[in-house]
Amino acid sequence: MSWPEVATAKKEKRHELVLAGPVITEKIQKYGLDANIFSILSLNYLNIHDTKLETIPDDIKLLTNLQTLVLHSNQLNQVPAVIGDLDKLKLLDLSFNNLKEIPESFSELNQLTSLNVSSNQLESFPKFATNAKLQVINLANNKLVDFPNICHPDMVALADLKLQLNQIAEISPDVKNLASLKSLDLTANKLTTIPKELADCNKLKEIMLKDNPIADRKLLKVVNASKGKPILDLVRTMHGTGDSKKGGGKGKKSKKESESVDLPDDPNKLKLQVLMHNVNETISIIVDEDVKKVRGHILACIVKGIQFDEQSLKQFIQLQTKLHDGICEKRNAATLATHDISKIVNNKLTYTAVKPEDLKLQPLNRTTIMTGKELFTKLQLEAESLRKEKKRNVYSGIHKYLYLLEGQKLFPCLNDNERTISFPPITNSETTKIGLGTTSMFIEVTSATSQGICRKVLDSFLLETLLLLNADLTVEQVKNTDVEGNLKSIYPSKNDLIFGPDVNVTVTRN
């Protein structure tokens, strides 16, 4: 018998299917993965995560329209070679499993742009030589001994290579063939030397080599204090390459270069001030027990010093869309919402879950107040009308996120007094909408997965906002409590908003 989630997706010829959590885990353990999944030929996005799934059937090859396949945080021991036949696949995420090898057929995925196989048990990696569109490879936290065989001239798009937490002893001199490489992370490996060819990677801006047993003491010092240009400059000097003056490898210039990493922070860096002392005087969130069964994770903060013009406001809205599609995994992992703090009338917010007919709000960009049930039904009708009008099975805007609430008896909401200001993961309220006059924002991130993803999204969002506005900002903490007032979590904590030295931001905490 087909699972309801799968039956609905097949009936409506959906393009996306997400299966995750305890209920799906129980079904997999009892019956195995529903084979009907592989008859939904319209799928281009399949996400099965946080289950105890151990194997993927070969029938996955039938999903010939797949562009995104997400299988992270399961218990996969192996993956079928036929995945290499999915010639439209662009993103493949197999992280946090128990994989010991990757099929060689994966090297034939010529449309692939991102491959994540981090946090597995890999001891080797197949040759990738002709994946001309591959931009990101993440092999962090495995058991690799050799540098992966990927340094070939046809790998023209590879820009980000993550190899931290392995046992790699040497960097391949062929790394110079990666003409687009911008970021290389080899933190916590077994490197003792750095090849001169690394300095030939002309676009390389970020290289992380900390926690390696580098033999040269001067190089070790620079490696532990930097992750960019000072390392490459010293490698050039040590090997007598580059534009250094004659004798530069032994003279005063080399000494200055090696010590330049100890200079104070650039005074021109953007400043992010975190206020950590007045949390009891600002907005706080009471997290009700009922919401934990629906969408149980929330973190928030206040940002002050905002100044929008028409262009930056437009870019800011686009930034939220970018994060929803990226780090938030199309709202499957998390959802963020922003509010003009001057329009919030009560400092004690409540994050809870109510029956769809009891949730009332004025949705963003709409003129009337409606219940959650009315909004959900209206959006469904709009989606169907749009599909018929465009004569294709495609959802757009917030309509494409309706499946995240299907079948739920309770809807999550963030309330200000009796007023709902946020209905994740669908929309927030028109009544607290930000605009050109907004100078202080309340930002909330919710998730059905973990507090960790909420922190990760907020860290990214605040950094991107700071860089977008190109102005110093102040962040105030927001705490979460239970209904008795006991502190449960707070953001940002002292462990949040920690950026690397190459990020043009200085964070201060008061």
Image (cartoon, rainbow, N blue to C red):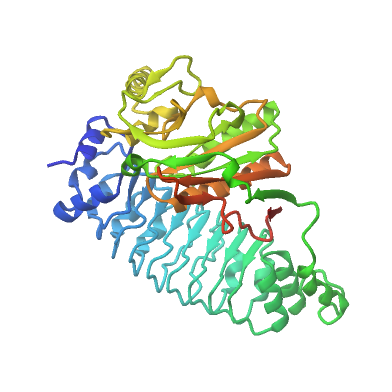
Classify the position of the N terminus by image quarter: top left
Would residue 330 be visible to someone looking at this image? Answer: no
How far across and down, in percent of the image, does residue 243 sit? 82, 69
- Which residue appears at 48% of the width and 69% of the height? 149
In the rendered image, the vertical position of residue 447 relative to residue 221, given as above or below: above
Q: Position of residue 34 (x, y in %)?
A: 19, 47
Residue that protrudes farthest toward the front in the picture: 484
Residue 49 in the image: state x and y as whole percent.
33, 52
Residue at 35%, 35% in the rendered image: 353
Q: Nearer the viewer, residue 32 or 449?
A: 449
Q: Is residue 370 left or right of residue 432?
A: left
* Residue that lies at the very extreme toward the left in this rendered image: 1
Between 67 and 30, which is closer to the camera in this rendering?
30
Q: Is residue 108 above or below residue 454?
A: below
**Extreme residue in the top direction:** 368
Is residue 440 shown left or right of residue 446? Answer: right
Location of residue 244 (image quadrant):
bottom right
Q: Nearer the viewer, residue 162 or 286?
A: 286
- Using the rendered view, name the quadrant where residue 183 is placed: bottom right
For image coordinates 46% across by 53% down, the residue present is: 452
Visible residue check, residue 401: yes
Residue 301's place in the image compared with 314, above or below, is below
